Amino acid sequence: MDISIKRKGDYIESVSTKGAVISLVSSGDGTEIIHHKLESGFRWYIAPEEGWLALEYVHILSGELVWQKQDGDVVLKSGDSITAYMLTEMANFIAAQETEFLYIVSRPYFHNYSGSIQKLFDFAVNIEEKDGYTSDHCDRIKRLSLLVGEKMGLSSYELYILNLAGFLHDIGKTKIPEHILNKPSKLTDEEYEQMKLHTTYGKRLLHESGIPDLRLVGDVVEQHHERYDGKGYPHRLQGDQISKLAAIIAVVDSYDAMTIDRVYQKGRPRDEALQEIERFSGTMYNPDIVKVFLSISDQL
Ligand SMILES: [Fe+2]
Ligand SMILES: [Fe+2]
């Protein structure tokens, strides 16, 4: 155990990302107590480890944490706790309001964990610095993708990857020159070719993070502009060759691009955008996903 870590306030060490502050409260004898403070709407996960020998324990201090189980939601309130032997697969949680809880784990975990959180935070900051539109857009894509994924009954692990891939789908745009990214008029052919590279750049950035889950996210991100009929980029994949998660992002990404107001152009009305998505079902978009997307249109 690394004992040379500095103390910050009441905590040994803290790391924050958009919507969450995670702090190491104590660590010794291989057990760590990790304090979490999540903003309303923040999603948090516990993934079962190979062998699953560690004892893990979640204790709610304040607020409300919703455990999204396949067979229905369980609301955890102040004073409630769960232990990890109750988990057989990845557990997904969402904070229903500002929520604080302790996560106690009988293995050294924080540094690994904080490394991923820090990496995600850096990505989020990069997106935000690039331009405000992209950052809000990424939040909306994450939210809408999850609505579709939940309706489709995806596994908790798939939803976890979809959450990250939705948010990070355009991360490669941080490598595209500003004048192309924010050009108010139509791109030239050459500029468009450069713009298309954001898929490849995105995959590369996520692969380079060295975090296994983010590698998977990178594979999804690379495919978010592939088309069902094989006319997309970068690899002209078609039909089921395209990851289901990427195909979800493709639909909600187009919908968002159509409906959003921009400096130079007002967004189109919701119903018109939905008709457009329906019109390209089976060519641009996976028809199964379009069907689900249209069925949740009242929640958009
Ligand atoms: Fe994109
Ligand atoms: Fe996008």
Image (spheres, rainbow, N blue to C red):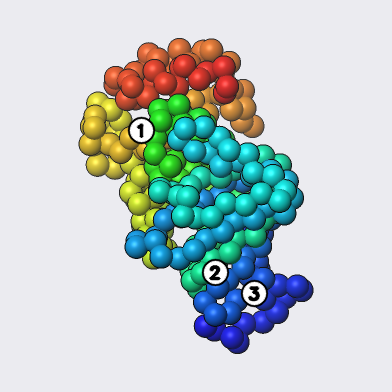
Image location (x, y in percent) of residue 203: 36, 53
Q: Residue at x 45, y 12 (%)?
A: 275
Q: Mark 3 belongs to which amino acid?
A: Ser
Measure the alpha-carbon separation of dots 3 and 1: 43 Å
Label 3 residue SS:
strand
Q: Give the side of residue 174 with respect to residue 75, left or right.
A: left
Considering only order in the chain, which callout, 1 or 3, is on the residue closer to the N terminus?
3
Q: Quadrant of residue 40?
A: top right
Question: Is residue 114 positioned above or below 132 on the image?
Answer: below
Residue 225: mark in rendering: none
Residue 177 is at least partly visible in this image: no
Q: Mark 2 belongs to which amino acid?
A: Phe
Image location (x, y in percent) of residue 113: 51, 65
Q: Give the side of residue 287 with respect to residue 178, left or right.
A: left
> What residue sits right under mark 1 in the picture?
247
Label 2 residue SS:
helix
Residue 110: mark in rendering: 2
> What residue sits right under mark 3 in the picture?
26
Measure the alpha-carbon separation of dots 2 and 1: 34 Å
Image location (x, y in percent) of residue 27: 60, 76
